[in-house]
Image: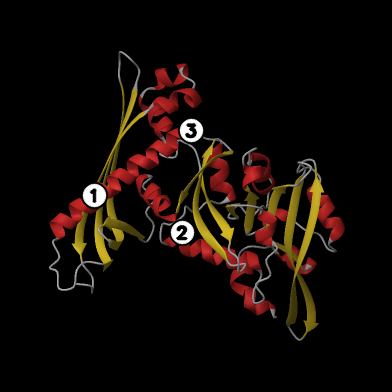
Amino acid sequence: MTLCLFTLFLASCWDQNLLVDKKMVNGISFDLDKDDNILATVRALNIENKGGGQFEVNDELVKVNRPSVSGMEIDINNKLPGLIDVSKAHIILIGRDLAKKGIYPFLELFYRPRQAYISSRVVIAEDKASDIISVDPGTSPIAFLILKGLEAAEETTKIPKVTAFTAWTQITDTGSDIVLPYVKKDENDKITIGGVDLFDGDKFSGTSLPNGKGSLLLLLMDRLTKYSEMAIDLGKHQSISFRVKNMKRNLDVKVDKKTSKITSKLNLTLELTIVSYSGKVGEKLNKEKLSKDISKILTDQSDEITKSLLEANCDALGIGRRVASSYPDLWKKINWDKVYKDVKFESSVKAKIERTGPVF
Protein backbone atom coordinates (compact mmCIF):
# COMPACT_ATOMS: atom_id res chain seq x y z
CA MET A 1 0.00 0.00 0.00
CA THR A 2 1.50 3.37 -0.94
CA LEU A 3 1.10 6.78 0.58
CA CYS A 4 -0.47 8.12 -2.59
CA LEU A 5 -3.60 6.10 -1.83
CA PHE A 6 -4.24 8.36 1.14
CA THR A 7 -3.34 11.71 -0.41
CA LEU A 8 -6.92 12.99 -0.17
CA PHE A 9 -7.07 12.19 3.53
CA LEU A 10 -3.63 13.52 4.45
CA ALA A 11 -3.24 16.63 2.35
CA SER A 12 -5.06 19.06 4.61
CA CYS A 13 -5.22 17.22 7.90
CA TRP A 14 -1.71 16.79 9.28
CA ASP A 15 1.31 19.07 9.52
CA GLN A 16 4.85 18.36 8.31
CA ASN A 17 6.08 17.30 11.76
CA LEU A 18 3.66 14.39 11.83
CA LEU A 19 4.72 13.29 8.36
CA VAL A 20 8.34 13.25 9.47
CA ASP A 21 7.42 11.24 12.55
CA LYS A 22 5.53 8.84 10.24
CA LYS A 23 3.00 7.97 12.93
CA MET A 24 -0.57 9.19 12.49
CA VAL A 25 -3.77 8.37 14.33
CA ASN A 26 -6.73 7.90 11.98
CA GLY A 27 -9.32 6.71 14.51
CA ILE A 28 -9.81 6.31 18.24
CA SER A 29 -12.55 4.78 20.37
CA PHE A 30 -13.53 5.04 24.03
CA ASP A 31 -15.43 2.48 26.11
CA LEU A 32 -16.07 1.43 29.67
CA ASP A 33 -14.26 -1.82 30.47
CA LYS A 34 -15.53 -4.47 32.90
CA ASP A 35 -13.92 -2.60 35.83
CA ASP A 36 -15.50 0.74 34.84
CA ASN A 37 -12.17 2.07 33.65
CA ILE A 38 -11.78 3.90 30.34
CA LEU A 39 -10.62 1.70 27.45
CA ALA A 40 -9.09 3.65 24.57
CA THR A 41 -8.47 1.83 21.29
CA VAL A 42 -6.33 3.57 18.68
CA ARG A 43 -5.83 2.90 14.97
CA ALA A 44 -2.58 4.48 13.79
CA LEU A 45 -0.81 4.60 10.43
CA ASN A 46 2.84 3.57 10.52
CA ILE A 47 4.54 4.98 7.41
CA GLU A 48 7.93 3.60 6.33
CA ASN A 49 10.05 5.24 3.67
CA LYS A 50 10.99 2.63 1.04
CA GLY A 51 13.03 5.05 -1.05
CA GLY A 52 12.36 6.55 -4.43
CA GLY A 53 9.42 8.50 -3.09
CA GLN A 54 7.57 5.30 -2.14
CA PHE A 55 6.13 4.61 1.29
CA GLU A 56 4.68 1.51 2.91
CA VAL A 57 1.66 2.13 5.15
CA ASN A 58 0.68 -0.27 7.94
CA ASP A 59 -2.46 0.12 10.06
CA GLU A 60 -1.71 -0.63 13.73
CA LEU A 61 -4.03 -1.21 16.68
CA VAL A 62 -3.24 -0.26 20.30
CA LYS A 63 -5.37 -0.45 23.47
CA VAL A 64 -4.80 1.27 26.83
CA ASN A 65 -6.82 1.34 30.08
CA ARG A 66 -6.98 4.12 32.66
CA PRO A 67 -9.43 5.31 35.34
CA SER A 68 -9.78 8.59 33.38
CA VAL A 69 -8.63 10.13 30.11
CA SER A 70 -5.71 11.89 31.80
CA GLY A 71 -2.43 10.29 30.82
CA MET A 72 -3.87 8.14 28.02
CA GLU A 73 -1.88 9.90 25.32
CA ILE A 74 1.32 9.14 27.25
CA ASP A 75 0.41 5.44 27.52
CA ILE A 76 -0.34 5.30 23.80
CA ASN A 77 2.98 6.93 22.94
CA ASN A 78 4.74 4.36 25.12
CA LYS A 79 3.21 1.54 23.08
CA LEU A 80 3.86 2.99 19.63
CA PRO A 81 7.23 4.34 18.48
CA GLY A 82 7.21 7.95 17.30
CA LEU A 83 5.32 10.92 18.70
CA ILE A 84 1.55 10.50 18.46
CA ASP A 85 -1.08 13.21 18.65
CA VAL A 86 -4.50 11.60 19.26
CA SER A 87 -6.22 14.93 18.62
CA LYS A 88 -5.55 14.39 14.90
CA ALA A 89 -7.94 11.42 14.65
CA HIS A 90 -10.50 11.47 11.84
CA ILE A 91 -13.03 9.38 13.77
CA ILE A 92 -13.91 9.56 17.48
CA LEU A 93 -16.07 6.57 18.46
CA ILE A 94 -17.71 6.42 21.89
CA GLY A 95 -19.55 3.37 23.23
CA ARG A 96 -23.10 3.91 24.48
CA ASP A 97 -22.39 2.71 28.02
CA LEU A 98 -19.70 5.34 28.34
CA ALA A 99 -21.78 7.99 26.53
CA LYS A 100 -24.44 7.64 29.23
CA LYS A 101 -21.89 8.95 31.73
CA GLY A 102 -20.98 11.96 29.58
CA ILE A 103 -18.79 12.66 26.55
CA TYR A 104 -17.48 16.12 27.54
CA PRO A 105 -14.09 14.87 28.89
CA PHE A 106 -13.36 13.04 25.63
CA LEU A 107 -14.25 15.98 23.40
CA GLU A 108 -11.85 18.10 25.43
CA LEU A 109 -8.94 15.97 24.17
CA PHE A 110 -9.77 17.01 20.62
CA TYR A 111 -10.92 20.58 21.16
CA ARG A 112 -8.37 22.05 23.57
CA PRO A 113 -5.01 21.39 21.80
CA ARG A 114 -3.79 24.38 19.79
CA GLN A 115 -3.31 22.39 16.57
CA ALA A 116 -6.12 19.88 17.06
CA TYR A 117 -8.02 18.55 14.06
CA ILE A 118 -11.42 19.95 15.06
CA SER A 119 -13.10 18.38 12.03
CA SER A 120 -12.84 14.93 13.64
CA ARG A 121 -16.23 13.20 13.35
CA VAL A 122 -17.90 12.26 16.64
CA VAL A 123 -19.89 9.01 16.46
CA ILE A 124 -21.61 6.74 18.97
CA ALA A 125 -21.25 2.96 18.77
CA GLU A 126 -24.40 0.94 19.42
CA ASP A 127 -22.40 -1.51 21.51
CA LYS A 128 -18.63 -1.50 22.12
CA ALA A 129 -16.78 1.17 20.15
CA SER A 130 -13.59 -0.93 20.33
CA ASP A 131 -15.36 -3.68 18.35
CA ILE A 132 -16.01 -1.17 15.56
CA ILE A 133 -12.53 0.39 15.41
CA SER A 134 -10.92 -3.08 15.60
CA VAL A 135 -12.60 -4.37 12.43
CA ASP A 136 -10.09 -5.26 9.70
CA PRO A 137 -11.68 -4.44 6.32
CA GLY A 138 -8.63 -5.68 4.44
CA THR A 139 -8.53 -2.96 1.78
CA SER A 140 -8.35 0.35 3.64
CA PRO A 141 -8.05 1.50 7.28
CA ILE A 142 -11.43 1.08 8.95
CA ALA A 143 -11.51 4.72 10.15
CA PHE A 144 -11.38 5.93 6.54
CA LEU A 145 -14.18 3.56 5.50
CA ILE A 146 -16.35 4.77 8.38
CA LEU A 147 -15.61 8.37 7.42
CA LYS A 148 -16.70 7.76 3.82
CA GLY A 149 -19.93 6.17 5.04
CA LEU A 150 -20.61 9.09 7.37
CA GLU A 151 -19.99 11.64 4.63
CA ALA A 152 -22.44 9.88 2.29
CA ALA A 153 -25.10 9.72 5.02
CA GLU A 154 -24.54 13.39 5.89
CA GLU A 155 -25.07 14.46 2.28
CA THR A 156 -28.42 12.65 2.15
CA THR A 157 -29.61 14.01 5.53
CA LYS A 158 -29.64 10.62 7.20
CA ILE A 159 -27.40 11.81 10.03
CA PRO A 160 -26.08 15.17 11.22
CA LYS A 161 -22.52 16.21 10.51
CA VAL A 162 -21.00 16.45 14.00
CA THR A 163 -17.34 17.33 14.52
CA ALA A 164 -15.31 17.81 17.68
CA PHE A 165 -15.81 21.55 17.25
CA THR A 166 -19.59 21.52 16.66
CA ALA A 167 -20.17 18.92 19.38
CA TRP A 168 -18.25 21.00 21.92
CA THR A 169 -20.14 24.16 20.90
CA GLN A 170 -23.57 22.51 21.15
CA ILE A 171 -22.88 20.81 24.47
CA THR A 172 -21.78 24.07 26.05
CA ASP A 173 -24.93 25.82 24.73
CA THR A 174 -27.55 25.68 27.49
CA GLY A 175 -30.35 26.51 25.04
CA SER A 176 -30.15 23.34 22.93
CA ASP A 177 -29.05 19.70 22.98
CA ILE A 178 -27.04 17.59 20.60
CA VAL A 179 -27.96 14.52 18.59
CA LEU A 180 -25.20 12.22 17.37
CA PRO A 181 -25.11 9.54 14.67
CA TYR A 182 -24.62 5.97 15.78
CA VAL A 183 -23.08 3.04 13.95
CA LYS A 184 -23.35 -0.69 14.43
CA LYS A 185 -21.68 -3.88 13.24
CA ASP A 186 -23.62 -6.69 11.58
CA GLU A 187 -22.88 -10.42 11.69
CA ASN A 188 -20.55 -10.03 8.69
CA ASP A 189 -18.49 -7.30 10.39
CA LYS A 190 -19.95 -4.65 8.09
CA ILE A 191 -20.29 -1.21 9.68
CA THR A 192 -23.63 0.47 9.01
CA ILE A 193 -25.34 3.72 9.99
CA GLY A 194 -28.08 2.98 12.53
CA GLY A 195 -29.66 6.41 13.07
CA VAL A 196 -29.27 9.12 15.69
CA ASP A 197 -28.90 9.10 19.48
CA LEU A 198 -30.60 11.78 21.59
CA PHE A 199 -28.53 13.55 24.24
CA ASP A 200 -29.44 15.33 27.45
CA GLY A 201 -26.54 17.73 27.89
CA ASP A 202 -23.41 15.68 27.26
CA LYS A 203 -25.05 12.39 28.28
CA PHE A 204 -26.72 9.83 26.02
CA SER A 205 -30.35 9.73 27.12
CA GLY A 206 -30.87 6.08 26.23
CA THR A 207 -33.29 7.04 23.44
CA SER A 208 -32.47 6.62 19.74
CA LEU A 209 -34.25 7.26 16.45
CA PRO A 210 -33.74 4.83 13.56
CA ASN A 211 -32.73 6.09 10.12
CA GLY A 212 -36.20 7.06 8.86
CA LYS A 213 -37.22 9.07 11.91
CA GLY A 214 -33.69 10.38 12.25
CA SER A 215 -34.00 11.93 8.79
CA LEU A 216 -37.33 13.53 9.67
CA LEU A 217 -35.86 14.91 12.90
CA LEU A 218 -33.11 16.60 10.89
CA LEU A 219 -35.76 18.21 8.67
CA LEU A 220 -37.60 19.40 11.79
CA MET A 221 -34.25 20.87 12.90
CA ASP A 222 -33.93 22.63 9.52
CA ARG A 223 -30.82 20.61 8.70
CA LEU A 224 -31.54 19.56 5.10
CA THR A 225 -28.28 19.07 3.17
CA LYS A 226 -28.23 18.06 -0.53
CA TYR A 227 -31.45 16.09 -0.23
CA SER A 228 -33.33 13.72 2.05
CA GLU A 229 -34.68 10.36 0.95
CA MET A 230 -37.31 8.52 2.97
CA ALA A 231 -39.68 5.59 2.62
CA ILE A 232 -43.01 5.18 4.41
CA ASP A 233 -45.68 2.50 4.66
CA LEU A 234 -49.05 3.68 3.35
CA GLY A 235 -50.96 0.63 4.58
CA LYS A 236 -52.86 -1.97 2.55
CA HIS A 237 -49.53 -3.42 1.38
CA GLN A 238 -48.56 -0.13 -0.25
CA SER A 239 -45.42 1.90 0.30
CA ILE A 240 -43.73 4.92 -1.20
CA SER A 241 -40.23 6.37 -1.23
CA PHE A 242 -39.50 9.98 -2.08
CA ARG A 243 -36.79 12.59 -2.15
CA VAL A 244 -36.90 16.04 -0.54
CA LYS A 245 -34.73 18.75 -2.09
CA ASN A 246 -36.65 21.83 -1.00
CA MET A 247 -38.48 22.65 2.21
CA LYS A 248 -39.78 25.47 4.36
CA ARG A 249 -39.78 25.42 8.15
CA ASN A 250 -41.47 27.72 10.60
CA LEU A 251 -40.85 27.39 14.34
CA ASP A 252 -42.84 29.65 16.64
CA VAL A 253 -42.28 29.56 20.41
CA LYS A 254 -44.77 31.34 22.66
CA VAL A 255 -45.00 31.75 26.44
CA ASP A 256 -48.34 32.26 28.18
CA LYS A 257 -48.08 35.46 30.27
CA LYS A 258 -50.30 34.13 33.05
CA THR A 259 -49.12 30.51 33.39
CA SER A 260 -45.62 30.74 31.82
CA LYS A 261 -46.49 27.61 29.84
CA ILE A 262 -44.38 27.24 26.71
CA THR A 263 -45.90 26.20 23.38
CA SER A 264 -43.84 25.35 20.33
CA LYS A 265 -45.59 25.32 16.95
CA LEU A 266 -43.59 23.74 14.17
CA ASN A 267 -44.80 23.76 10.58
CA LEU A 268 -42.87 21.97 7.87
CA THR A 269 -43.59 22.11 4.13
CA LEU A 270 -41.80 19.55 1.97
CA GLU A 271 -41.54 19.41 -1.82
CA LEU A 272 -41.37 15.77 -2.87
CA THR A 273 -40.12 13.84 -5.86
CA ILE A 274 -41.42 10.28 -5.92
CA VAL A 275 -38.71 7.65 -6.31
CA SER A 276 -40.88 4.51 -6.11
CA TYR A 277 -44.52 3.71 -5.40
CA SER A 278 -46.10 0.28 -4.96
CA GLY A 279 -49.52 1.23 -6.26
CA LYS A 280 -51.75 -0.97 -8.34
CA VAL A 281 -50.65 -1.74 -11.90
CA GLY A 282 -52.18 0.80 -14.30
CA GLU A 283 -53.50 2.93 -11.46
CA LYS A 284 -53.55 6.65 -12.22
CA LEU A 285 -51.60 8.60 -9.63
CA ASN A 286 -53.76 10.94 -7.56
CA LYS A 287 -51.12 13.43 -6.43
CA GLU A 288 -53.47 15.43 -4.24
CA LYS A 289 -54.72 12.43 -2.27
CA LEU A 290 -51.28 10.88 -2.00
CA SER A 291 -49.84 14.19 -0.78
CA LYS A 292 -52.49 14.31 1.97
CA ASP A 293 -51.80 10.70 2.99
CA ILE A 294 -48.07 11.37 3.21
CA SER A 295 -48.70 14.59 5.14
CA LYS A 296 -50.76 12.79 7.76
CA ILE A 297 -48.20 10.01 8.22
CA LEU A 298 -45.29 12.44 8.51
CA THR A 299 -47.25 14.64 10.94
CA ASP A 300 -47.93 11.60 13.11
CA GLN A 301 -44.26 10.68 12.97
CA SER A 302 -43.21 14.21 13.90
CA ASP A 303 -45.53 14.03 16.92
CA GLU A 304 -43.82 10.78 17.94
CA ILE A 305 -40.41 12.41 17.49
CA THR A 306 -41.23 15.45 19.64
CA LYS A 307 -42.62 13.09 22.29
CA SER A 308 -39.32 11.17 22.22
CA LEU A 309 -37.40 14.44 22.55
CA LEU A 310 -39.36 15.37 25.67
CA GLU A 311 -38.95 11.91 27.21
CA ALA A 312 -35.21 12.07 26.53
CA ASN A 313 -35.03 15.66 27.83
CA CYS A 314 -33.26 16.43 24.54
CA ASP A 315 -33.85 19.96 23.25
CA ALA A 316 -32.64 19.18 19.75
CA LEU A 317 -34.91 21.83 18.22
CA GLY A 318 -33.35 24.61 20.28
CA ILE A 319 -36.55 25.69 22.04
CA GLY A 320 -34.51 26.93 24.99
CA ARG A 321 -32.50 29.22 22.72
CA ARG A 322 -35.75 30.77 21.43
CA VAL A 323 -37.04 31.28 24.97
CA ALA A 324 -33.74 32.85 26.07
CA SER A 325 -33.81 35.22 23.10
CA SER A 326 -37.48 36.27 23.20
CA TYR A 327 -38.17 35.99 26.93
CA PRO A 328 -34.84 36.79 28.67
CA ASP A 329 -36.42 37.65 32.04
CA LEU A 330 -38.21 34.31 32.19
CA TRP A 331 -35.08 32.46 31.05
CA LYS A 332 -33.11 33.84 33.99
CA LYS A 333 -35.68 32.53 36.46
CA ILE A 334 -36.28 29.00 35.20
CA ASN A 335 -34.33 25.74 35.37
CA TRP A 336 -34.53 24.66 31.73
CA ASP A 337 -33.68 21.02 32.50
CA LYS A 338 -36.87 20.80 34.56
CA VAL A 339 -39.09 23.13 32.52
CA TYR A 340 -38.36 21.67 29.08
CA LYS A 341 -40.28 18.42 29.73
CA ASP A 342 -43.49 20.46 30.09
CA VAL A 343 -43.19 22.21 26.69
CA LYS A 344 -46.25 21.61 24.52
CA PHE A 345 -45.43 20.75 20.91
CA GLU A 346 -47.81 21.27 18.01
CA SER A 347 -46.34 20.00 14.76
CA SER A 348 -47.63 19.87 11.21
CA VAL A 349 -45.98 18.47 8.09
CA LYS A 350 -47.40 19.35 4.68
CA ALA A 351 -46.12 17.25 1.80
CA LYS A 352 -46.48 18.48 -1.77
CA ILE A 353 -45.67 16.12 -4.62
CA GLU A 354 -43.94 18.33 -7.18
CA ARG A 355 -42.43 15.67 -9.42
CA THR A 356 -43.12 12.00 -9.98
CA GLY A 357 -39.76 11.25 -11.58
CA PRO A 358 -39.56 8.42 -14.14
CA VAL A 359 -42.05 6.25 -12.23
CA PHE A 360 -45.31 7.71 -13.66
Residue 37 figure quarter: top right
| Alpha carbons under labels 1 and 3: distance apart | 27 Å
Q: Earlier in the sequence, mark 2 or mark 3?
A: 2
Q: Nearer the viewer, mark 2 or mark 1?
A: 1
Callout 2: 10 Å neighbours few (<14), some, many (20+)?
many
Q: Earlier in the sequence, mark 2 or mark 1?
A: 2
Q: Nearer the viewer, residue 174 or 217?
A: 217
Quadrant assignment for the C terminus: bottom left
Which residue position holds label 3?
A: 313
Which residue position holds label 1?
A: 295
Residue lying at 21% horizontally and 52% vertically, measured from the top left: 293
In the rendered image, the residue lying farthest to the top is 258
| Alpha carbons under labels 2 and 1: distance apart | 24 Å
Which residue position holds label 2?
A: 154
| Left or right position of 280 against 51 | left
Tag 3 secondary structure: loop
Q: Amino acid at mark 2?
A: Glu
- Considering only vertical position in the picture, is 332 above or below 10? above
In the rendered structure, are the residues bearing label 2 and label 3 in contact, judged by CB atoms less than 8 Å apart?
no
| Left or right position of 212 against 61 | left
